[in-house]
Image: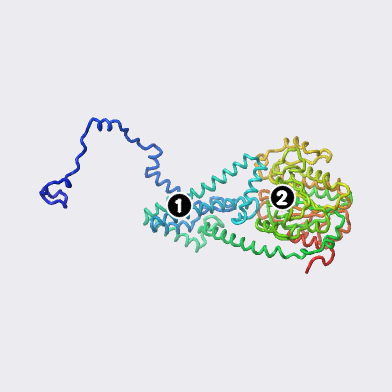
Amino acid sequence: MQPTDLADPQQKPDEPETAETAPESEPAATPETDQAVQDEEPPKPPGRFRRLLRSPGAAISLTVLACVILFVALLFPNVLKRLTVGSFVRIPIELGLGLAVVAFVPRRVRIVLASIAGVVLGWLVLEKSLDMGWFETLARPFDPVLDWELLDDTYGFIREAYGQGAGYAAIAAVALLAIGVPALTTWAALRVSAAAARYQKQAGFAAGAILAAWVVAFTLGVQVVPKVPLAARTSVTYAWDRAQQARAGIANEARFADEVKIDAFKNAPGDQLLSALRGKDVIFTFVESYGRNALEAPELAPGVNAVLAAGTEKLQQSGFAGRSGWLTSPTFGGNSWLAHSTLLSGLWINNQGRYRNLTASDRLTITSSFKRAGWDTVSVMPGATRAFPEGNFYGYNRIWDSRNLGYQGPKFSWAPMPDQYTLKQFTEREYAKPNRQPLMVEMPLVSSHTPWTPIPEFIDWDAVGDGSVYADIVKNQQSKSETWAFSRRVKKAYGDSIEYTLTSLIDWVKTYGNDDLVLVYLGDHQPSKVVSGENASHDVPITIITKDAAVLEKLNTWNWTEGLAPNASAPIWPMNEFRDRFLTTFSSPGTAAH
């Protein structure tokens, strides 16, 4: 081999070097440059953590972690009882489809698709988590269109029941999850998609294997865990269902605008409305969370029914009699205002959109019917801590709430004051006033509001005073953490709270009720699932108490049960039917338009 064979093939043999072809010479060393080189600090080696992250083992581990995150997110359920190992022993079809797509698209498209998929998947996990909370308390999924404003009420409940610190902690946790979950799923999607693009052949085989296994499992109905199909399409189905729910919600609002205009009593003359109740004081009282379970569940019924049986006898001795039935509430476990508005308006108000549209309308309510007929209409709202603008819609002349009832005692968790105090204040401020008009009153009683601890004790009416007497009662109660440590304690606390409110209300009728009293009291909804259990109905008891035989005779056509406790076979009406039945029964014949 000749020496010229190792030379650059573009250089001609024996061609003299020129300035252009001559190699660059190193700059001449000087004492100054030598000193500068000596003064330069050698580059720092990467730290242990950074070296660990750069290692092949760590890279593989992070990719595996990203796969696990996507796998869990795709199979994450939206019902708490399904959050089991069995729910994750499944094959998500979305994982196979995703791998098949991102492995073979250009880099920019892959990044965009993975980012969108990660954000959407994180959002679905968050909404499923909201579903879990909604199912546990309200027995329904979170509505992605209408329920966002209920988060403010949730925060208010946490703050009132557990303190301002707990409220701030809840906000911080929600913010952290709202940012952290989509960020985590997006990182996982980007990392897995990058690995799939780097190893296209392997990713293609993996996608094919996942899809083939899914098709076989789906076709054969394979179940590794009983009643849980191995072939899963959880996220796709869930996203579709939520989209359909949102679409149905929007259509429902449009239909409601027509429903609210249909009202047989809209133009009913005041002198014909409620003519059979002229001169009566008519009080509608909602007992918080007073549901059918309180009268029928084995752990609750003995105590509650004993109070009702003793109350029936006690009131009979004072000349009162009662009739009781069942209503089906539009809500469960909370959102009491939906039940209030349903009963009073005669429309089915089962979500916040309908409630908002109702209170912006001119719909005739039971309250405004009494007002049109000449009654003095009053609301007593011990649970309200701020202004209630909907009062104008309902037709109240005055509203008493926690800000103007003069209570000086301790709070009972969410309830600002005990029900017995509320009843005593109502008596002094309205009911016992001389020379007044007949009253129509709407009064929610709230001592039986979750978390059912601490619970007031029934005391002598003369000892109620300004409420400061309750300070010692609160001190002797179990803490929330002690009560909620066991479900049996929660159920007992709920039962005790119902017994307290019913005892207070019945004794108020016996002590202060006059010959013109007509009391309608009912539950707003069942308690949450921790008390009611799975598959509980939406039924609540309703009772009408009076001394007037003519009023009781009007109720004969309703076929309700005598006394304060309805029989299991008593009629069950949807709550929205009550308004028209009540107005028809107690108004002059022909009052309703046909």
Q: Residues within 10 Å of mark 1 (few under 14, many from 20)?
A: many
Residue 356 location (% of width, % of height): 67, 56
Circle 2 — which element?
A: loop
Q: Is residue 415 or residue 377 the one in the foreground?
A: 377
Query: Residue under circle 2?
Result: 388
Closer to the chain start, of discs 1 and 2, is 1
Q: Is residue 219 or residue 553 the one in the foreground?
A: 553
Q: How many marks?
A: 2
The residue depicted at 18 percent of the width and 44 percent of the height is 23
- Label 1 and label 2: CA atoms lie apart by 47 Å
The label number, if any, that marks residue 189 in the structure image = 1
Q: Is residue 402 or residue 96 the one in the foreground?
A: 402
Residue 325 location (% of width, % of height): 78, 57
Left or right of residue 29, residue 399 in this image? right
Circle 1 — which element?
A: helix
Residue farthest to the bottom? 594
Residue 506 can be seen, yes or no: yes
Residue 418 location (% of width, % of height): 76, 42
- Compared with residue 409, is residue 219 higher up or lower down, i.e. above or below? below
The residue depicted at 75 percent of the width and 46 percent of the height is 401
Q: Residues within 10 Å of mark 2 (few under 14, many from 20)?
A: few
What is the three-letter code of the residue carrying label 1?
Ala
What is the three-letter code of the residue carrying label 2?
Phe
Residue farthest to the front? 19
Left or right of residue 344, residue 226 in this image? left
Residue 564 can be seen, yes or no: no
Q: Kindly report which numbered mark, 1 or 2, lies closer to the viewer in this rendering.
A: 2
Q: Are marks 1 and 2 in contact (CB under 8 Å)?
A: no
The residue depicted at 67 percent of the width and 42 percent of the height is 161
Instruction: Work out which quarter of the rendered image holds the C terminus and state it.
Output: bottom right
Residue 184 location (% of width, % of height): 48, 48
